[in-house]
Image (spheres, grey):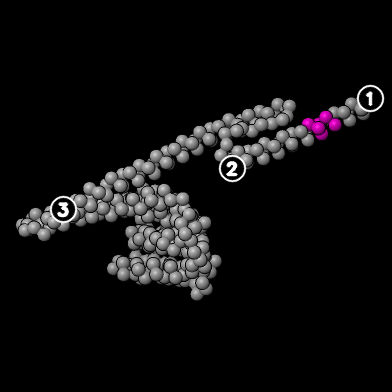
Amino acid sequence: MIYALLCAVIAALIIKIIVMKKAARDINEQFAQKLSDETNTLIALDTVDKDMKKLASGINDSLKKLREEHNRYVCGDAELKAAITNISHDLRTPLTAICGYLEVMKKSRLDEQTAKYLEIINGRAELMKQLTEELFRYSVILSSDGSEETEELAVNGVLEDCIMGYYAAFTERGITPEIKLTEEKVVRQVNKNNLARTFNNLMNNALKYSDGDMYISLSSDGEIIFSNTAAGLTKLQVERLFDRFYTVREARNSTGLGLSIARTFVEQMNGSISAELSGSRLIIRIKL
C-alpha cells in the first residue's frame, strides 16, 4: 500500500515537472518572440500550474511597461528629429541673408572702429552658419534609412586620403601624426563618402582634444585606432562622447554632433565604434 502510494506521488511529481518544463519553454519562446516582433500580444500559457501562470502574468506586466517606454522613446525621438530638421532649415535662410549683407557692408567706406566691429560680427555669423550647416547635415543623416549605395573599397586608400587632407592642420598645431597602416589591402563593403566623413570627424575631434600627439593605425583585420593624449578628459566625458549634442567644456565652437555622426555612419556600415580612456590617452576604435 505504501509502495503504491509512493509510486503515485513520484509519478505526480514527474508529471508536474514535465508540465512546468513545457510551460517554461513556452514562456521562453514566446518572450523572445514578443521582444523581436512588433506586436501587442502577450504571453499565453495552456497550463493549470498556478506558479507558472503567476510567472507569465508578471512577465506580461513587464512587457506592457517596456512597450509603453519604447513607444514614448520612438515618439520622442521622431519629434526631436523633426525639430532638428525644422530648426536647422529655418536658421539657414536668415543666416545666409545676414552673411550676404555683411559682405555688402564690408565693401562700403567704414571707419576703423566700425570695420573692426563688422569683422567680429562677420566671424560670429560665419561660425553660426557653419554650426547650422552641421546641424542640417545631421538632420539629413537622421532621416536617412541607411540604404546609401555601397561598394567594395580598400579602407587603406580612404584613410590615407583623409590623413593627407588633415596633415596641414595637424602641422599647424605642432602635431606630427604617428601612422601605422597595414600594407595588406583591407577591403570592405562601404559607402565611400560616409567612411571618409567618419575619418574626418575623428581627426577633427583629435585636433580639439589632443595635447600634442596623434596615433592612427589600421590592422589587417579591419580595426582602425585613433589615439591621442587628452589629459583634460575624464572617463565620464569619454563615455558620453558619442551622445548627440554633447560637448566637453573646451569644445565651445561645436554642436557635439561630429562623433555622433561618425557612430551613425559606422553602424550603417555594420561596424562598431567605441571610445576608452587609458591613463591620459583617448582611444577610439572602429571595427569594420
Query: Over which residues does the magenta segment extend?
Result: 11-16
**What element does badge 1 sit on?**
loop
Q: Relative to 226, is 55 on the left or the right?
A: right
Q: Amino acid at mark 2?
A: Ser
Earlier residue among tags 1 and 2: 1
Residue in view at x 92 percent, y 29 percent: 3
Pointers 3 and 2 in contact (C-beta within 8 Å)? no
**What element does badge 2 sit on?**
helix
Q: Point out residue 145 in the picture as x, y percentages from the top left corner.
A: 46, 50
Q: Point out residue 123 in the picture as x, y percentages from the top left corner.
A: 20, 56
Residue in view at x 70 percent, y 26 percent: 50
Q: Which mark is residue 36?
A: 2
Q: Point out residue 2 in the picture as x, y percentages from the top left corner.
A: 92, 26
The foreground one among 135 and 218 is 135
Earlier residue among tags 1 and 3: 1
Task: Answer few, some or many: residues within 10 Å of disc 3's Cα (few below 14, many 20 plus, some between 14 and 19).
Answer: few
Quadrant where the N terminus sits is top right
**Residue behind mark 1:** 1
Which of labels 1 and 3 is toward the front? 3
Judge whether residue 219 is colored magenta: no
Pointers 1 and 2 in contact (C-beta within 8 Å)? no
